[in-house]
């Protein structure tokens, strides 16, 4: 009769930082006995479980550090989206080949169709590939850069943003940008050109961005560089938020 795990075994596993295996170990041992598994096969099964658990935990932590919302993943987006878009472009983006090639992705469409959700979902896929990711709304990004000018860390902050492998800027173009914001975005787009990738979401087409920047020359330069290196995905359809609206119970 199986008497359970000994205290000595439990202490040894905890000392080796394998304590997370303890809840499933009795079942694994039972199956191993029933199937008369080779000890090497049992060890492989146990260690594979632990590798997968640690990998998943690492991805969760890195996604949190990147600012990615945990529920905005590709599986959930596909299951709920009732929208029209270029499916070939969508499939190309989810392969992340644009990141490998240092291209960009521009996701456009009206309010509520899932632009933010898809941008975060691409970020999660990138984290799963162990790429460095950072996501910010445009307003929050400009706020950080404005604050960094005040405390003397502006150059350091720009360098940090330059070295992220996938930079996601959500809701660009909601309002006009002042001279400092225009300069910062120009520096980011030009500095990352052909070196690192960006995902940008916007309610406006790039031609409409030009009138929002303080400096027309910088505006033309950054829009030209970004657009000519970007896949463009237009999403149209029903607002996702409308389906989340509370309903009176009958």
Image (cartoon, grey):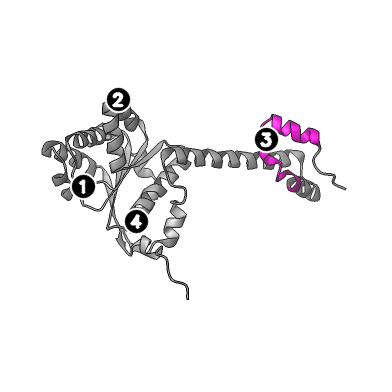
Reading the image, the residue beneath label 3 is 18
**In the image, what residue occupies the spot 64% across and 42% down?**
49
Residue 202 x/y as whole percent: 26, 50
Residue nearest the observer in this picture, 170 or 95 = 170
The magenta stretch is: 7-27
**In the image, what residue occupies the spot 72% across and 33% down?**
13
Residue 111 x/y as whole percent: 29, 57
Q: Earlier in the sequence, mark 3 or mark 4?
A: 3
Q: Is residue 76 above or below residue 213?
A: below
Q: Earlier in the sequence, mark 1 or mark 4?
A: 4
Q: Earlier in the sequence, mark 2 or mark 4?
A: 4
Q: Is residue 104 above or below residue 246?
A: above
Q: Tell me which corner region of the image, top left, top right, bottom left or bottom right, holds residue 182.
A: top left
Reading the image, the residue beneath label 2 is 151
Mark 1 crowd level (few <14, some 14–19, many ≥20, 10 Å Cα): few
Tell me the distance, in whole angstroms, between the alpha carbons under discs 3 and 4: 44 Å
Reading the image, the residue beneath label 1 is 175
161 vs 39, left or right, is left
Secondary element at image label 2: loop
Q: Earlier in the sequence, mark 1 or mark 3?
A: 3
Q: Is residue 73 above or below residue 19?
A: below
Tell me the distance, in whole angstroms, between the alpha carbons under discs 1 and 3: 52 Å
**Closer mark to the observer between disc 3 and disc 2:** 2
Residue nearest the observer in this picture, 2 or 151 = 151
Tell me the distance, in whole angstroms, between the alpha carbons under discs 2 and 4: 45 Å
Tell me the distance, in whole angstroms, between the alpha carbons under discs 2 and 1: 26 Å
| Residue at far right of view | 1
Reading the image, the residue beneath label 4 is 88
């Amino acid at each position: 009769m199986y008497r359970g795990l000994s205290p000595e075994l439990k202490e040894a596993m905890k000392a080796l930082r394998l304590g997370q295996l303890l809840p499933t170990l009795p079942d694994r041992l039972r199956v191993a006995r029933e199937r008369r598994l080779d000890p090497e096969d049992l060890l492989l099964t146990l260690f594979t479980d632990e590798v997968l658990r640690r990998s998943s935990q690492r991805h969760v932590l890195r996604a949190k550090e990147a600012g990615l919302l945990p529920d905005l993943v590709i599986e959930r987006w596909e299951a709920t989206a009732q929208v029209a878009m270029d499916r070939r472009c969508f499939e190309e983006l989810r392969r992340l080949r644009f990141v490998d090639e240092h291209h960009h992705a521009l996701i456009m469409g009206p309010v509520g169709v899932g632009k933010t959700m898809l941008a975060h979902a691409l970020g999660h896929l990138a984290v799963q590939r162990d790429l460095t990711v950072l996501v910010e709304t445009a307003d929050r990004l400009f706020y950080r850069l404005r604050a960094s000018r005040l405390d003397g860390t502006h150059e350091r902050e720009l360098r940090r943003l330059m070295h992220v492998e996938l930079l996601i800027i959500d809701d660009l173009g909601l309002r006009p940008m002042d001279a400092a914001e225009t300069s910062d975005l120009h520096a980011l787009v030009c500095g990352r050109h052909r070196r690192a990738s960006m995902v940008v979401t916007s309610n406006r087409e790039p031609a409409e961005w030009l009138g929002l920047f303080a400096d027309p020359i910088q505006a033309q330069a950054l829009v030209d560089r970004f657009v000519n290196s970007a896949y463009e995905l237009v999403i149209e359809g029903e607002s996702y938020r409308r389906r989340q609206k509370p309903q009176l119970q009958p």
